[in-house]
Amino acid sequence: MAKINVTPSGRAVTFGEDELIVSKTDLTGRITYANDIFLKVAGYDLKDVIGSPHSMIRHPDMPRSVFKLLWDTIGAKREIFAYVVNMAKNGDHYWVFAHVTPSLDASGNVVGYHSNRRLPDPQKVATVAALYADLRREEQRPDNRKTGMETAFQKLVDLLKEKGVSYDQFVFSI
């Protein structure tokens, strides 16, 4: 699928508490499976998403440093829970509480990734949104994007160290 330039609309979209967004990707993050709830909330057809990078739903307010933490974690064959703000095809945004796991073959090799996303508590989203805004400001401060991401990542690591918790423990403690 060709890259679609989407501008954030500022409108929030939601989904039901009993609904679960599910997607799977290959090792490079290209979508290999998306359930009907994913398609409905994101506003895409199945033909639009299969083979496309999962980052097609990345909202620009989502800190790159949190994605670094996510990829580092699943790359080490560990699961992660994270709050994520995504963007639908029409520019609307939606928050999810994601559980991302590596998919392993019979020999224990990572062959892809699996993510289940639930509707998060709005009060918890407000807390996370404030942290993410702070991380985004840190990412945008230096002239170099990579330096900004690394500085924000270190800020996140330092915050977790100060609290004496892992990122998963942090998100569950909110």
Image: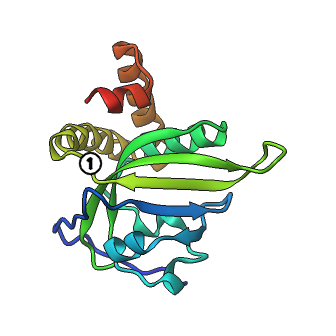
Please identify the quarter of the rendering in which residue 129 is found: top left
**Model colouring:** rainbow
Q: Residue at x 50, y 54 (%)?
A: 115
Left or right: 134 in relation to 80: left
Left or right: 41 in relation to 102: left
Q: How many marks?
A: 1
Residue 31: percent from the left, percent from the top?
Answer: 57, 69
Amino acid type indicated by mark 1: Pro
Residue at the front extreme, as displayed? 18
Residue at the right extreme, as displayed? 107
Look at the image and tell me in which quarter the N terminus lies.
Answer: bottom right
Residue 131: percent from the left, percent from the top?
Answer: 26, 37
Q: Does residue 46 show up?
A: yes
Q: Does residue 144 show up?
A: no
Residue 68: percent from the left, percent from the top?
Answer: 51, 43
Q: Residue at x 38, y 70 (%)?
A: 37
Q: Residue at x 66, y 38 (%)?
A: 77
Please identify the quarter of the rendering in which residue 44 is found: bottom left
Mark 1, other Cα within 10 Å: few <14 / some 14–19 / many ≥20 = some
Look at the image and tell me in which quarter the C terminus lies.
Answer: top left
94, 156: nearer the viewer: 94
Q: What SS does tag 1 mark?
A: loop
Q: Which residue is mark 1?
A: 120
Left or right: 45 in relation to 174: right
Residue 94: percent from the left, percent from the top?
Answer: 27, 61
Q: Residue at x 38, y 78 (%)?
A: 5
101, 85: nearer the viewer: 101
143, 9: nearer the viewer: 9
